[in-house]
Amino acid sequence: MTADQRLLLVHAHPDDESIGQGATMAKYVAEGRGVTLVTCTAGEMGEILVPELEHLADDRDGGLGEHRRGELAAAMKALGVTDHRFLGGFGTYRDSGMKWHEDGHAVAADEVHANAFWHADLTEAADHLVAVIREVRPQVLVTYDQFGGYGHPDHIQAHRVATYAVALAAVPSYRLDLGEHWDVPKVYWGAMSESRMREGLRVLRDSGDSTSFEGMDPDGPLPHFVTPDDQLAAGIDATDFVDAKMAALAAHATQITTDGPFFALSNNVGATAWGVEYYRIAKGERGELDENGLETDLFAGL
């Protein structure tokens, strides 16, 4: 990595990166900053939204992970990201799957594959990421909060692995074979602005759309992945790169449909729906803030 400023993102499955930080990734690539994506599983247990590809499901012929590997490559091409790795190499960890809890968040499935990421040894998985951190030497790392956004076990595990790896990578005497120690200055958790989500839902409902983000009331309780605005630390305005983000989302065709809620929100609200991406700070000091009390650059203050 030759760029002076380098961002490392740690995500659980293909498509998570485009949903959460696709616009930021495209913006930073265009600005000449280094962007590295680490994906922890191939998403073998994902729901398949393309009828002609339903045979790839794990309980049928299988092969969804390899297919999603191709979708991820296409998404990275749309965003301009050239440095992407699977944690420990492709196939090291398997998608754990999930089920829905009665409270509306995800939990571990009743049966979990032996090689599932949820069952991964924490130190072993963290060491794979330590090697990447020490190679790339990012100033900023982005991952999930401790709940994984909505409770998916792989998201929670990605948070744990990233958090532990950041700590281990900074220890000068730890695993010298993994490279020279590196202390990541700033760590962020991806977030969704509560006010922005409510605004978007109101526009959708006023337009007559009652199915996108079904069950969410713009004036009622919102899911776990929505963050109160006073907990946000940064808002990256990448509205000029919304088209790249939407192209990346469209590339994940088995998981996201162009007539689904992400595209509905974009079509009704416009570029601001997905062009400004929000973050909570988990490590480091914030730099210069805008009039809303937010950083406008994840590298601020470095």
Image (cartoon, rainbow, N blue to C red):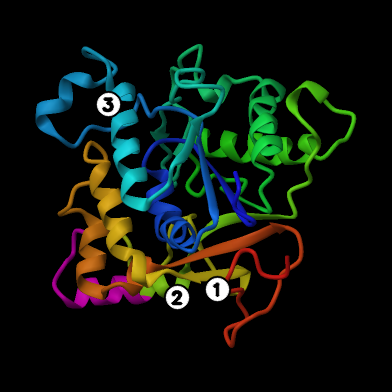
Report the side of 241 relative to 247 (left or right).
right
- Residue 280, compared with residue 199, is above or below; it is above
Quarter placement of the C terminus: bottom right
The mark tally for this picture is 3
Relative to the observer, which residue lies in front, 105 or 277? 277
Q: Position of residue 18 (x, y in %)?
A: 38, 50
Write down the residue under mark 2: 195
Determine whether the residue tagged by mark 1 lies in a helix, strand or loop. Answer: helix
- Residue 272, compared with residue 73, is above or below; it is below
At 34% from the left and 36% from the top, the residue drawn is 73
| Quarter location, residue 21 | bottom left
Query: What span is colored magenta in the figure?
Result: 199-214
Report the side of 30 relative to 145 (left or right).
left
User: Of the residues under marks 3 and 2, which one precedes in the sequence?
Assistant: 3
Q: Is residue 67 visible?
A: yes
User: Of the residues under marks 2 and 1, which one precedes in the sequence?
Assistant: 2
Write down the residue under mark 3: 67
Q: Position of residue 20 (x, y in %)?
A: 44, 54
At 15% from the left and 75% from the top, the residue drawn is 207
